[in-house]
Structure formats: structure tokens, C-alpha cells
Amino acid sequence: MTTAQQPENKVQQARTVAELVDYIQALNTEIQELYCLDEIPWVLGVSWGKDSSTVLQLVWNAIAALPPEKRTKTVYVITTDTQVENPVVSSWVRKSLQNLKVAAKKQGMPIDPHLLQPVIEDTFWVNLIGKGYPAPRNQFRWCTPRLKINPANQFIREIVRANGETILVLGTRKAESSKRAATMKKHQVDRVRDRLSPNASLPNSLIYTPIEDWSNNDVWIYLNQCDNPWGQSNKELFAMYRGATADNECPLVVDTSTPSCGDSRFGCWVCTLVNKDKSMEAMIQNDEEKEWMQPLLDIRNELDIKDDRDKRDFRRIWGDVQLFERNKNGEISVEPIPGPYTKYWREHWLRRLLEAQTKTRRTAPENMRDITLITLEEISEIRRIWLEDKHEFDDSLPRIYQEVTGEEFQDPRPGADYSLLGRDEWIVLEEICEGDAMHLELMAKLLDTERQYRKKTRRVGIYETLEKCFNTSSRSPEDAIKNARLKRELSEAVSQGDVAKVKQMTLGDVAAINEVDEGESESDEQVTWASMKFKKENSEE
């Protein structure tokens, strides 16, 4: 196969326009030969930014130049909609996909576009508002696999299952970052064919990166000089990047010292993995017609705070207290790892999101008035999680929805509005518990567990579930953290072989239990709020 030869160190050196033209011609031949070489289907991943648009245009033009009888192999064009993309970019993506689909059919091109989405359980708001996952951080980057990687990988696996293997065509470039360059260089070592690298995460798939050695300048010169074959305007893409640049300027590139337009990075408007959403800030700053996005930027900035421990539970999402050594200003302390957002803050984020959606639908331009920040299906799944997984049977979601939107929430889930427990019972329970949050949580879990098992023909597992309620919710936060520290110290003593300390700690637990139950408890029983309360009641009887 003929390979477009890249001059050595070309990433650092600027190409002339003539050199770029020659290189594109060679690359065109390379793409044609690789396409006709076998029957392996291609999957071309696009975000509809400048790089992936360039690759798609190169592939389209190369295949279009082939005789119709040779255009037999399908090129699947996939785009992942995270459902929290920058609204302006999201609108551009949907418009581009529609144009691509129409043009491919009209021109007889073997292009099959697909818009992929994460499953409802993996969407951003279901995890953050429903389950209470904290805003993503580099230490807990839970969003990328769920929103982007999983949908694409699932599609690619289906193509591999149907055809045995596939070639994944990407617009990645070494000039994007030093980390990207190092990764691509590492994969080059294991190449099985020219330009084809193995995919470490997906067996039977190879990666083809035709513009891996292109610079930003090369990309923009190509897009501005070559017409888009499916009817989309590359000038419009250029303008979108310019609008997302802080100084609103994309200068004429005359030498290597002149920066090009294109360093703007579009992504999820809720992203807290970066310090600032510079592209959205620039859009709002540069264009009065985009000021309607300010409520979205406000939510993003509110999520992105350095310390959100006061908004989160002292337990992990499964209910256990997990400790870590914290070094603050040189002082080391053992603290609990913060867990999910509390009920109050999950309800707060839902309210803020619905307020932003309601406002933007009033203030956005006419073509953006149907904007959806959170879908009805996501809201329904959040309600299910609050009711069934978190046992919050006060069912606050429909009330919040109506207060913010002025509309009644119509849950699409069958039987969602049927429940033996509701807001009235929750208010009574709050009065009984007299402000004791852990007591309220335990009673709610116990009552709702009984309700859930009441509908089953066999109540297998109810005792284990009830026991879990006591294990996770029967202690006050102070006692639960103290108990976790004791367990940690005991574990350290065992690992160090400190027999004396182990005896001291375990015998101390036995003595504490005996004080409560006058010597009747077994030494391996945990001292909890529930065990003490029930033992006292039994002794009175």
C-alpha cells in the first residue's frame, strides 16, 4: 500500500501551501488503496470539530473519486452525544449529521451516520442528581467512560461481532498535546501495517490516523481552501471557533510565530475537569445573541468548587465510612472520604437545572427555543433512584418540577405514581424523629424496605436488606466515623502483628457491649444505636 510520506520533524516545521497540496494528493491515494484493500468496514469517529471534520472530508473525497462499483465498503460515521454538550456545538452537530445523511444518499456514497447516546443509567444528570455522584474531578473522572467511551465501544463491538474486525478512523494529531504525541508514538511501535495501530481496548480493531502529523495551520488551510462535499459550511465552523476564542480573532497565518485559530476546545458545558469553560465564556463575551447561555455557565461554575465536603455525605455511596490520610498545611489527619451529594443538594441541583432550562427556553434565539438540558426520561430515572434506591418516599421531584416549570410532571414510567407511602407519611416521620437526621433515614429505609418486599410473592432476602439498613444508618455521623477509625487501627495492629494492641482493642469492645447488656451480648456483636435501643427495650420487658 502506498503511504503518504511525512517529512521528518514536520510537526515542528511549517508546511508551505504547495507542500500541503502535494501531501493531500498522496494521502488521497493512500486512503483509496486502504479502502479497496479488503472488506473490513470502517468506523469513522467524529465530534464535528476541525480535526474530525478534516478526516471525514478527506475520506469522503477519496472514496468519491473511486468508480461507483468500488464504493462497496460501508464507512460508519459515529458521533457521541453526551447530552451535556455546548448547545451551540450540539446544534451544529445535529445539522451536520442531517446534511451528511442527505448528501450521502443523493451522491451514492457508502456513508452510514449514527448519533450515539449513553444509556439512561449512565447520563450525567442521572449520576449527579440521581445517585449523587460529585462533580467530576481528575481523581474521580466518572463521566468520560459513561458518556463517551462506552457508547462508542458498544457500537464498535457490534460491528466487530458482525464482521470479525474493523478499522477505526480518527482525527487525532500529535500536535494536540505532548501527552497525545507520546501515546501515538508508543502505538506506532506495534503497527501491523502502515498507519494502522492496534487498539488496546478493543480486540480485532485497528486505528487509522491519517492527519496524525498535521498542525493546526494545516487543518485550517485545508478546510478553508477545500469545499465541504456534503454541503456544510467550513466558514461557519471557522466562525464558531473564532467566537469561542477569548480575543475573538483568528489571524492570517504568515509564519510559525503567528498563532492560528483553533485552540478553542469544545466539550461538555458542565465539565469541571478544566479550570474554566473558556470557549463558552468567550461565546457569551463575543456575541450578545449567546448571552442566553449564561445560566448554564453559572451552574457549571457553581459545581466547580474546590471543597464541596459540606454538600456530601460522610459515607461512601454504598453506606460505609471509608477513611484516608489528609495532609492539610503539613498537618496529617485521618478523615472520612466524602460520599455522594446529600438529599438537600441533589434537590438543589435539580431545581437549578430546571430553572436554567425554563429560562433559556424563553431567552434563547428562535432556533434554540426547544433546548433540552435534561430529558423527561432522565428525570423519571432520577425519581426512581430517589424513591427505590435511596428510600426517599416523600417523592419531592414532582413537587420541585411543578414549582419551577409551572407544569405537572408526567412520569412515563408505568406505575410510577402508585405508592403506599408519600409526603404525608414523611412529614409525620420527621416529627417523630425530632430533627435526628440519621434516625429519620433509618426509619425511612426500614419502612420502604418493607413496602418494597410487600409486593413480592417471596420475601427472600428481606432480613439481609434490613440488616444492611441498620449497618449503614443506625449510628450518628460521629459514632460511625469513630467506629471506622477503630476498625482502621485494629486492621493496622493485625497487619503489624501487635498482639497486645489487638487484645486491648477487642477486649475493650467486649467491655463496652457488656455495659449495655449486662454481660449477655456476644463478643463479636457490634455496638450500634439499634442494638442498644432494642436491648434496652428487651431488658425492660
Image: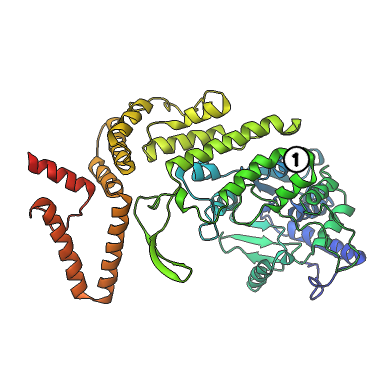
Q: Nearer the viewer, residue 220 or 61?
A: 220
Q: Where is residue 521? Give x, y as percent.
A: 11, 53
Q: Nearer the viewer, residue 228 or 420?
A: 420
Query: Mark 1 = which residue?
Result: 290
Secondary structure under tag 1 reads helix
Quadrant the C terminus occupies: top left
Is residue 509 placed above or below 82 in the rendered structure? below
Residue shown at 72%/67% (left/top)? 174
82 vs 339, left or right, is right
Image quadrant in which you'd find residue 292: top right
Q: Nearer the viewer, residue 10 or 271?
A: 271
Q: Amino acid at mark 1?
A: Lys
Q: Is residue 29 visible?
A: no
Q: Where is residue 412? Give x, y as percent.
A: 50, 28
Q: Residues within 10 Å of mark 1 (few under 14, many from 20)?
A: some
Is residue 62 placed above or below 488 in the rendered structure? above
Q: Where is residue 404? Give x, y as percent.
A: 56, 29
Image quadrant in which you'd find residue 7: bottom right
Q: Where is residue 179? Give x, y as percent.
A: 65, 68
Image quadrant in which you'd find residue 334: bottom left
Is residue 182 placed above or below 396 in the rendered structure? below
Quadrant the N terminus occupies: bottom right
475 vs 141, left or right, is left
